[in-house]
């Protein structure tokens, strides 16, 4: 089965500018990606970012089946995109995720799992933080509450909807709120060194704050109200 018949990609976005363009450029370079549907759930109000989205449509229209819809906070953007998915699998990809090897999507779609994620690499100065996060993610699986970062979540569409899909009212740690519901036996962390992301989250909030809030998210995993508050993340 070709990738376009198996997979739809959903990207939430707001004022990402050239970062979103680069993300889509890496997608377009994936092996056997031709004709794959890519849904950009966007709420940009920045003129330059809107111009980049127009350029994306023009530059990649012969490689990808591109569509731009109304988004919101990440959960709402992903939810809006997921409602349009008709393929057996959907990949939620953040706009600052770069698939730097052309076989990433082909390789991860060979597994028939409910949810697949990947480790991330980043700038050398911050890479150690992501290696600590890998440990946290591995422990979460052992504890029976898998944590798949929303930046890269490959879902079996049927399972995604059985678990309720994204909740648009959740504006913090919405990725963990959903991924923790997956059976750990059907959750896979695909080992790769070719998925790059910016360290901007840690630069903005600080390493201690990020790990502290991860622990709080775990402790509040059964408290829906916790995920409906921003906890200062969007400040």
Image (spheres, rainbow, N blue to C red):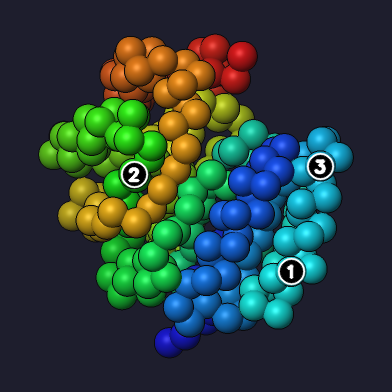
Task: Return the disc, 3 or 1, that comes first in the chain's sequence.
Answer: 3
Q: Tell me if mark 2 has few (under 14), some (14-19) or many (20+) residues whose alpha carbon lies within 10 angstroms of its own.
A: many
Residue located at (71% from left, 80% from top):
62
Toward the right, the furthest residue is 47
Residue located at (67% from left, 47% from top):
18
Find the distance from the CA under tag 3 to the CA under tag 2: 27 Å
Using the image, tell me which numbered label, if any, was put on residue 121. 2
Q: Are marks 3 and 1 in contact (CB under 8 Å)?
A: no
Residue located at (81% from left, 58% from top):
54
Residue 77: where, in percent of width, then height?
Answer: 64, 44
Q: Is residue 216 visible?
A: no
Residue located at (28% from left, 70% from top):
111
Image-based side of 122 in relation to 229, left or right: left
Q: Are marks 3 and 2 in contact (CB under 8 Å)?
A: no
Q: Tell me if mark 3 has few (under 14), some (14-19) or many (20+) residues whose alpha carbon lies within 10 angstroms of its own.
A: some
Toward the bottom, the furthest residue is 1
Q: Which residue is mark 3?
A: 48
Q: Picture quarter containing residue 72? A: top right
Residue 63: where, in percent of width, then height?
Answer: 64, 78
Q: Picture quarter containing residue 58? A: bottom right
Secondary structure under the numbered disc 3 in the rendered image: helix
Find the distance from the CA under tag 1 to the CA under tag 2: 27 Å
Task: Return the disc, 3 or 2, that comes first in the chain's sequence.
Answer: 3
Q: Which residue is mark 1?
A: 59
């Amino acid at each position: 089965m070709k990738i376009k018949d198996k997979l739809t990609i959903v990207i939430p976005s707001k004022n990402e500018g050239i970062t979103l363009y680069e993300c889509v450029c890496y997608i377009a370079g994936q092996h056997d990606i031709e004709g794959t549907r890519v849904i950009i759930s966007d709420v940009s109000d920045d003129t330059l970012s809107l111009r980049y989205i127009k350029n994306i449509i023009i530059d990649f229209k012969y490689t990808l089946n591109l569509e731009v819809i109304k988004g919101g906070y990440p959960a709402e953007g992903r939810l809006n995109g997921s409602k349009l998915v008709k393929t057996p699998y959907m990949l939620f990809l953040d706009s600052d995720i770069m698939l730097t090897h052309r076989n990433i999507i082909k390789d991860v779609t060979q597994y028939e799992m409910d949810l697949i994620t990947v480790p991330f690499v980043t700038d050398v100065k911050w890479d150690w933080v992501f290696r600590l996060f890998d440990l946290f993610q591995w422990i979460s699986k052992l504890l029976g509450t898998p944590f798949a970062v929303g930046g890269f979540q490959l879902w079996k569409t049927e399972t995604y909807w059985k678990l309720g899909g994204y909740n648009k009212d959740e504006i913090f740690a919405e990725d963990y709120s959903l991924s923790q519901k997956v059976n750990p036996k059907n959750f896979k962390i695909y080992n790769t060194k070719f998925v790059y992301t910016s360290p901007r989250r840690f630069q903005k909030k600080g390493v201690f704050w990020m790990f502290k809030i991860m622990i709080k998210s775990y402790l509040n995993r059964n408290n829906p109200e916790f995920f409906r508050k921003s906890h200062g993340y969007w400040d």
